[in-house]
Image (cartoon, helix red, strand yellow):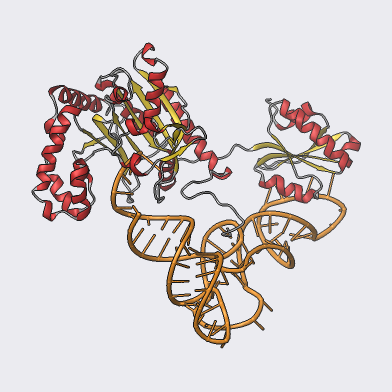
Amino acid sequence: MAEQGNFRAPRGVADILPGDQTLWNAVRATAVQTARQFGYQQIDTPIFEHTGLFRRGVGDETDIVQKEMYSFDDLGGESLTLRPEGTAPVCRAYIEHGMHNLPQPVRVYYVAPMFRYDRPQAGRYRQHHQFGCEAIGDPSPVIDAEIIEIGLRYITALGLSDVSVRINSIGDAGSRGGYADELRNYFDRYSSDLPKVDRDRLERAPLRLLDSKEPVTQKLSADAPKSLDYLSDEARAHWESLLALLDGLKTAYPNFSYRIDHTLVRGLDYYNRTVFEFEPANEGSQTSLFGGGRYDPLIGILGGDQTPGVGFGSGIERIILEIQRQKSLKVADPPVNAVMVHVGEDATHRASALAAELRNLGLSVTMAPAGKSMRAQMRYANRSNANYAVIVGNREIEQGIAAVKPLQFGGDQLSVSLDADTIAKSLYPDL
RNA sequence: GUGGGCGUAGUGUAGUGGUUAACACGUCAGGUUGUGGCCCUGAAGAUCGAGGGUUCGAGUCCCUCCGUCCACCCCA
């Protein structure tokens, strides 16, 4: 709290407190389960990589590389960077470990923290977590559709509705150059009408004008040349096949629809052909829940043999914000089976030993705080979301019994013999 | 990197120049002899983000910094 003396978490990073963990775990578990349902296997890459991996992979000119990387020199003088995204590291691992020798495509997923030096705001953090899937080694649009379907299934499993899917094809490297020039020429003609932000963008990233938030530019974008009109024959065939595959998903996902959006572009250099985004219907600007696409050039850029790939990244924090907005997922912590209430030193020792034996039987057991009054311990038991209190005091020890009191199910307090098996059976007869 | 809003106990708030900064929730303790939830009582907990200034006097006004939120940029 205080400026000096007390530490607080650095800007833009957050603690995930015990009260949030249930939801986090549910989301993570859903991600893992969904990925596995499609035959994806987990991969973990290091939190930091050589800086060059991102400079080359993500692109030297991108904002991520230009101004958002957590880079540092280690004690050996090596420039390292906290990973800002997951795709380049996965591709590096693919190359490094000769994964082209595995059956193709290689399907992997990860749930991992990412780091970007950004100004924090709603849904944007300096450390955030992404659930990502990558399918490497298959050029077919079938795998593009699969990647999008994983997103659909994940969203559906989380109970989210009103999530719109936008897709576009930005073509291949060759045709894209011609398209970018075409686009620049188009906007150049209206250069004097453009707001300053967009005039600046014109030279360095003409594609970016398409998703500008300036009303003037938006109006112009509607009639701008479309990347879809500049696709090579191959890219066009790929695109049309993808659309047919997506239409085919509508039987399995009755609520699914997608929108072709020729203003959709992506900020990372390695994308080609298919790009897509999932976003919820509500207001707010940091709302993109998913972003992904095809990145056929990437592995070549990183020094591997030309190998196609496609994947997505999805922000866990944003998903959680959306779940909370929609109240789409109700989760509850599992209760503790029993709290040991113990008064007196002998009783405390006995309760401690009993708790251990009960845990051997598979129960979750918590000790109420030692040395406190029975009332305080009972209050603690009540607040700890426990099913039963197992009460052991000097009186019980003398009689060789324990008092078992149901806290949530109603019913009377019982006296049972002071023995782990008997106590466990009295709590859970089916055990 | 740019712009705007906001910073009072763990949390949410009240207090808009004048005595020991208030309330709720939470925490802790108690309310007959060893038994939770509801209720009641009490206690602890805030140098009012930090530093400077104006004033007889500042949580309240001004400046700077920091933090935070929102938007731009960009992205998940």
Q: Tell me if residue A306 can be seen.
A: yes
Residue A348, given in percent of the width and then of the height, sits at 83, 39
Question: Outermost residue, front direction?
Answer: A77
Q: Nearer the viewer, residue A354 or A74?
A: A74
Question: Where A153 sits versus A66, above or below?
Answer: above
Instruction: Locate residue A53 relative to residue A426 in the image: left or right.
Output: left
Question: Where A78 sits versus A198, above or below?
Answer: above
Question: Where B47 sits versus A54, above or below?
Answer: below
Using the rendered view, name the quadrant where residue A5 is placed: bottom right
Instruction: Locate residue B25 relative to residue A34 in the image: left or right.
Output: right
Question: Where A269 sits versus A284, above or below?
Answer: above
Instruction: Locate residue B65 relative to residue B71 in the image: left or right.
Output: right
Residue A115, given in percent of the width and then of the height, sits at 43, 40
| Residue positioned 33% across, 42% down in the render | A66
| Residue positioned 38% across, 36% down in the render | A314
| Residue positioned 12% across, 51% down in the render | A191
Q: Nearer the viewer, residue A351 or A412?
A: A351
Using the rendered view, name the quadrant where residue A409 is placed: top right
| Residue positioned 71% across, 37% down in the render | A338
Residue A395, given in percent of the width and then of the height, sits at 89, 41
Which quadrant of the figure contains the N terminus of chain A? bottom right
Question: Outermost residue, left direction?
Answer: A189
Instruction: Locate residue A201 relative to residue A105 in the image: left or right.
Output: left
Which quadrant of the figure contains the C terminus of chain A? top right
Using the rendered view, name the quadrant where residue A223 is placed: top left
The tally of labels here is 0
Q: Tell me if residue A288 can be seen.
A: no
Residue A72, given in percent of the width and then of the height, sits at 46, 39
